[in-house]
Amino acid sequence: ELDPAAAAASGIRVEPAAMRALLPELRTTGRVAFNENRLAHVGPRSEGRVAEVKADLGAQLQAGQVVAVLDSVELGRARADYLGARAGLRVSESMLAREEALLAEKITSQAEVLAAQASFEQARATTSAAAETLRVLGLTTAEVEALTFGAGTPGRLSLRAPFAGTLVERHLQRGEFVSPSDTLFTVADLSSLWIWIDVYERDLSRVHLGDEARVEVDAWPDRTWTGTVTYLR
């Protein structure tokens, strides 16, 4: 027997018996991990030497923000090829327009126009291929279209954050030589995380997709996070 004050202090409640569904609770351990759907490893698309490092560990990055700049000989060559192809395309376009004007005045033949047309189409294909090479190496379409002779630094390649997030790993220093097989940065979106929980085999039948999960961590003993079981393995 307890008096009301003792019952209240011990958290005991007295209620009439009733039928209801009981939700079994499983207490277990787990570990916090990155949301792998929002995790990116950033590396170069061509060999080069690191000219600038523009972000430190823990930096909050915006989508498209430059995190490093490389000096790339391959990019310099590709840029020169593109500018040369674009110049050739302009010449071919002018020649085609000239031949079409001459044909309209019956000064040239249809064969000359067809030859100019073929030259123009070949130049356009070459220019398109050169532009695609630059995009594969990491330049945006706007950057490709803005290229001109004598402007900027020909072999400078910018590495950018693929989405907004936190820079959680960095594996490069200024002056270091890097290649496409290297991972230079890791960017993670920390707005959501995964929790990998440990479940003993005897308890597997008690865990289902869609079950609610509550997470507590020692660092914040007064806080609780909720989530949903989305994957079992």
Image (tube, rainbow, N blue to C red):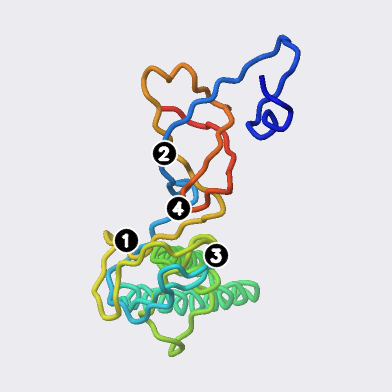
Q: Where is residue 59 in the image (x, y as percent from the top left)?
A: 47, 70
Tag 3 residue: 63
Amino acid bearing label 1:
Thr
Crowding at mark 1 (Cα within 10 Å: few <14, some 14-19, many 20+): some
**Which residue is nearer to you in this view: 132 or 119?**
132
Of the image marks 1 and 2, the number of the one nearer the N terminus: 2
Q: Where is residue 35 in the image (x, y as percent from the top left)?
A: 48, 47
Q: 10 above or below 140? A: above
**Which residue is nearer to you in this view: 201 or 140?**
201
Of the image marks 4 and 2, the number of the one nearer the N terminus: 2
Q: 33 above or below 3? A: below
Tag 2 residue: 30
**Badge 4 element:** strand
Of the image marks 3 and 4, the number of the one nearer the N terminus: 4
Give the label, 4 or 2, closer to the camera: 2
Tag 4 residue: 39
Quarter of the image where the N terminus is located? top right
Distance from Cα at disc 3 to Cα at disc 1: 18 Å
Q: In the rendered structure, find residue 183 and report the number of the disc placed on it.
A: 1
Seen at 37% across and 64% down, the residue is: 185
Amino acid bearing label 4:
Leu
Amino acid bearing label 2:
Gly
